[in-house]
Amino acid sequence: MKHTRVLTIYFNEELAIHEIPLFRGAILHVLGNQADMLFHNHKGDGFNYTYPLIQYKRIHKKAAIVCINEGADLIGQLLSKGDLSLTLGERTLALTLEKVIPQRVTTQVWDSSFRYHLRRWLPLNSENYKIYRHLETEMERITLLERLLTAHLISFLKGTGIWVEQQIECKILTPSVPYLVRNKETSLMAFDIDFKTNLSLPNTIGIGKNSSIGYGVITQFSQTNQSKKI
């Protein structure tokens, strides 16, 4: 049985969606040479293609940082600096801590299923985007997305050192009309979906492309099935 430790750091200040990459850059500037690789997920001059254990987000319109496993151990480097003054583009943000929410989630495959929201998910790379475009029916597109979703969940498991022997099952519950988001100079196809899986997952983690900067955020349905929008 494996546990995933998640520490979600909530700040008081509002953050626009397009400011999330600037938020990460400003945090890295504050940390300077002290920043561990997990804060930026770069290795040498290149990108470290592993699951990001420190993720920068906008939750309930406010700035937040989600720290997973080893990332939770390192966030003290930032919190020890107290209130921060960050430069985000043309504005200055005086960052103050609101609350810290710890989670310890048993991450495994169960006989039952769990229902989740997934917001601003980027499942398609250039190769499977071409496949998606040429599919003729909604059912074919959903089947492809379910396969990609399963692959992204497996990537999360590998990145957090969890191995499961049972088959992971994913079913998309709500058809999603894709929409375009801008990442630097590129337009990417994003999806908001509800899905169920037999894998228990921590709240607020990200999966898929650009999960370190606010894409692919997972939230679990409450017991009353009320939506917890991010």
Image (cartoon, rainbow, N blue to C red):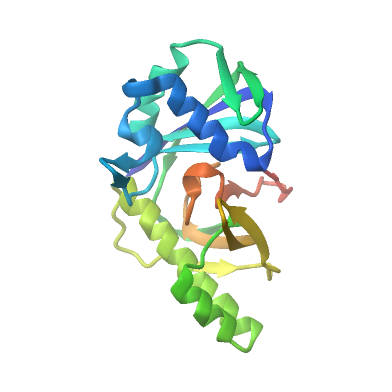
Q: Residue furthest bottom?
A: 136
Which residue is rendered at x = 46% and y = 16% of the image? 79
Q: Nearer the viewer, residue 5 or 225?
A: 5
Going by the image, does 151 lie left or right of 70?
Answer: right
Residue 191 seen by the camera: yes
Going by the image, does 146 lie left or right of 90?
Answer: left
Q: Nearer the viewer, residue 124 or 107?
A: 124
Residue 50 location (% of width, % of height): 33, 49
Residue 1 seen by the camera: no
Residue 100 location (% of width, % of height): 54, 22
Residue 76 location (% of width, % of height): 40, 18
The answer to whether 8 is drawn above or below residue 164 in the figure is above
Q: Quadrant of the C terminus?
A: top right
Count of numbered circles in the view: 0
The answer to whether 39 is drawn above or below residue 95 in the figure is below
Which residue is rendered at x = 36% and y = 52% of the image? 157
Which residue is rendered at x = 38% and y = 18% of the image? 77
The answer to whether 151 is drawn above or below residue 143 in the figure is above
